[in-house]
Image (tube, rainbow, N blue to C red):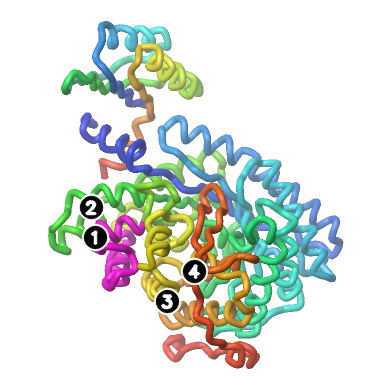
Amino acid sequence: MSKAIITVVGKDTVGIIARVCTFLAENKVNILDISQTIVQGYFNMMMIVDISALEDRFGAMADGIEALGDEIGVKIKCQKEEIFTSMHRI
Amino acid sequence: MLNMFEVIETNNMIEQEKLDVRTITLGISLLDCCDSDLDAVNEKIYKKITTLAGKLVSTGEDIEREFGIPIVNKRISVTPIALVGGAACRKPEDFVTIAKTLDKAAQEVGVNFIGGYSALVSKGMTEADEMLIRSIPQALAATERVCSSVNVGSTKTGINMDAVRLMGEIIKKTAEATKEKDSLGCAKLVVFCNAPDDNPFMAGAFHGVTEEDAVINVGVSGPGVVKVALEKARGQNFEVLCETIKKTAFKITRVGQLVAQEASKRLQVPFGIIDLSLAPTPAVGDSVAEILEEIGLERVGAPGTTAALAMLNDQVKKGGVMASSYVGGLSGAFIPVSEDQGMIDAVTMGALTIEKLEAMTCVCSVGLDMIAIPGDTPDTTIAGIIADEAAIGMVNQKTTAVRVIPVIGKTVGDTVEFGGLLGYAPVMPVNAYSCEKFVTRGGRIPAPIHSFKN
């Protein structure tokens, strides 16, 4: 299974999770884990998702979800998991 | 499973502390492009580079997007051209045609620099070596992306003082040939002692003759990450300080390792080495000088600078070697003046001099780098500077280099703008006493006694 990490940071507003999840469902991306906190009114979310079904469409999906972030007014990043595991796991 | 803290830490390094992969450099052997016909050599070189490196830039961009880590430069290094063109070139102008071919190929594949317009003359020069060296001013003036390097000494062979004297002349001529661009040509020309075969960083990259047909070398960076980590260790003792640098270097290098493996897999080119140098850029917060100041110096150049740099360099290497199986190139901390805002400030306020920089090169990863000097500095004085650096490298069994820019028409107090990653530099004063009789003796300085290890 290949995984990616999606991070969402920004001012809290109604429907952030709903819109991100809808986007992912439309792109056939399965969500494996979600953690979320609000710090001083700022929304912080991290999702671990399964991107096996995407194959070479990953880049386009990552661009798409970043654009969605601009629309909502939050910063969304989608990165393959290895960048984090290589740095934090031996 | 990963936690949010780890993810945020990595992304802060990238977004706020300017962690990046400085370069993916594709080394290409051009030995099979040798021919006695010059046109044939040029054609073969162009074809080989554009075929092998065709996907380098797009692959780099894909990796950048998928992992969310900036890869600042995609570059190419080739076999030293003095070897490749030796059979075909009869005069320096012939070598210039190869430089133009390299430039054209680099432009075609979209890389910003191509290194390897080089000659390895640590003991002696062949006719072709000398011709190539004499063609450097013209080659660097006629091209945009070609970088040149000359290795004039090594611990095993001693220092070729004929080549040192010649390079003094060539640097001046290159400055003259590119004087309307503030002598920019000299920023693309490095003189080495103990040059590594697998250096991914420009301007000194070339693909050594001991390497395979093609290889991926990666240079990671991240002075900003080290600086921010050290802010949390303020006032702590050296043990804590060293531990912090090591851990940070480890994390940075792991990212480089990931990028190198991905690039190697996607381009189907073997992975060579990771060079884990801290390479600064003119951006604020991306500075080696700022790390040294964070360690406890009021300004870089103050007493204690050499010791602080020695420690930094060593800890970066210690952290890095644990993170990758193949560490090579130069590895350590670069101290280019024009590319480091902290260095520029220290020079401007008089805290940092060429003499202190020379001392720092005894313990850093390379040498006197990107230093602007007055345009009327004599050839022989530049040769003397090169000889001093080469001697440091030869005796200490380390790589040293000189990349000085005698800026024609400018003098101490002026500032030179090179643009982009090359930054800007105040012109620094050089000792005015002559070494002409020393550098014009001719011949070579023998290898030091501790080189006899057989």
Estimate how packed mark 3 is, as few (under 14), some (14 to 19) or many (20 or more) residues with alpha carbons within 10 Å.
few
Please give the name of the residue rendered at 55% of the width and 89% of the height, measured from the top-left corner. B445
Q: Amino acid at mark 4?
A: Met
Q: Amino acid at mark 3?
A: Glu
Q: What residue is pinned by disc 1? A: B295
Picture layout, residue B241 above or below residue A64: below
Which chain does the residue under circle 3 lie in? Answer: B
Q: Which residues are magenta?
A: B288-317
Q: Judging from the image, what secondary structure is the residue with disc 2 in?
A: helix
* Residues under numbered marks 1 and 4 in contact, where contact means CB atoms less than 8 Å apart: no
Q: CA distance from mark 1 to mark 3?
A: 22 Å
Q: Amino acid at mark 1?
A: Ile
* Residues under numbered marks 3 and 4 in contact, where contact means CB atoms less than 8 Å apart: no
Disc marking residue B230: 2
Please give the name of the residue rendered at 58% of the width and 35% of the height, measured from the top-left corner. B58
Residue B253 visible in the shown view: no
* Residues under numbered marks 4 and 2 in contact, where contact means CB atoms less than 8 Å apart: no
Residue B204 visible in the shown view: yes
Q: CA distance from mark 1 to mark 4?
A: 25 Å
Q: What residue is pinned by disc 3? A: B355
Q: Amino acid at mark 2?
A: Leu
Decide which of tag 1 and tag 4 comes sooner along the chain. 1
Decide which of tag 4 and tag 2 comes sooner along the chain. 2
Disc marking residue B428: 4
Residue B339, x across and y down, in percent: 47, 55
